[in-house]
Amino acid sequence: MIQLPINFIKTIKSVHKKKGDLWLHDFHRLIEECEERWQLQILQPFDLSYNFVAPAIRIDGTELVVKLVIPGKDFQAEVEALSLFDGRGMVKMLDVDLEKGILILERLHPGNTLATLDNDVEKTYIAANIAKKLWTHVPKSAYIPKISEREEQFWKIYNKHPNGFGPFSKKDLYHAVNTFSLLNSKKEKLFLLHGDFHHYNILNDGNDSWIAIDPKGLIGEREYDIIQFLLNNLPDENVLEVINKRINVFVEVLKLNKERILLWGYAHAVLATCWSVEDNSQYNQAFLNSVKVFKDLYSEYFGKCNECLLDK
């Protein structure tokens, strides 16, 4: 019998409340249903965060991945994104039950994350070429969120905390959310994005083959989709140099707008830091450090930015 880690159980209860309790109560029944319905055996899970994800083997020996989530809009957006990406730079969806929150996915081998590589520039080139495959025209969608919804989330944080939040003063939050709003008001061409594009959502599927997983699905500018990659898997030292090199690779390969990358980076780094406080009651130091990095890089390349409030 699969035993769920205590921290995972706490996360499910904290995030989903009563729905989480019910899901946990029915978890083993759901496992049994999956095994019978798809004629497979579910093995011990991978490291768990917000969803149950585990390797599985069918009777005929085919290896799969089973993902079990608490159904809702986020799950519907993920399923729709997987369908729209249709295996183009993205793991393939083999079957789904929207009502019960079941996803059956292809198994990637060896499945190491991009973070396991040593050369940061090499990692960034790999990520840039995956992004080139992923990003596509904006679909007609009932579930995939728009970047404007993240702006609304940011304003809610600002309005909820009139004296500042986490490591940020009220002025800090005001500058960042206004920059986010300014970028949204002057947004350029929109695309279907991954929505959570970073090193740990890119897996090895052979010697030179890398595939993205776990799309949230988001409609927005391409420049915004790389920000989470810029914020993740950072060293303890020379962070500005590393982020700068990553940005230059993305600009080179994808012909992105460097100024908008830096502005999105600054605004989203503040938002991501706030999210980390909401999730863990303490801020992510790497995200916080990146706020200053994006401001410094903007000043280096473009000088003052009074309109976006970076220098006020």
Image (cartoon, grey):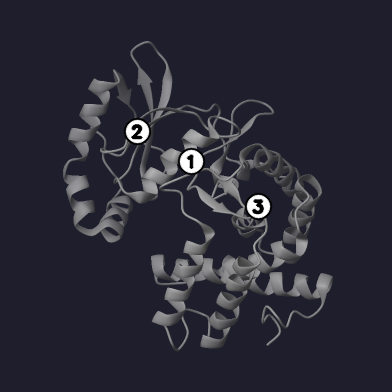
Neighbour tally class for label 3: few under 14, some 14-19, many 20 plus, Cα within 10 Å: many
Circle 2 sits on which residue? 44
Image spot of residue 64 (x, y percent)? 42, 25
Neighbour tally class for label 2: few under 14, some 14-19, many 20 plus, Cα within 10 Å: some
Please tell me in which quadrant of the rendered image residue 174 appears: bottom right
Q: Is 20 left, or right, of 256 in this rendering? A: left
Circle 1 sits on which residue? 81
The residue sitting at 69% across, 28% down in the picture is 208
Circle 3 sits on which residue? 222
Q: Is 160 left, or right, of 218 in this rendering? A: left
Image spot of residue 249 (x, y percent)? 78, 50
Residue placed most toward the observer, 115 or 253: 253
Image spot of residue 176 (x, y percent)? 59, 76
Of the numbered discs in the image, which one, if any, rests on residue 269?
Answer: none
Q: Residue furthest front?
A: 140
* Residue 203 visible in the shown view: yes
Quarter of the image where the C terminus is located = bottom right
Residue 101, placed above or below residue 15: above
Quarter of the image where the N terminus is located = top left
Please tell me in which quadrant of the rendered image residue 183 appears: bottom right
Q: Secondary structure at mark 1?
A: helix
Q: Residue furthest top?
A: 60
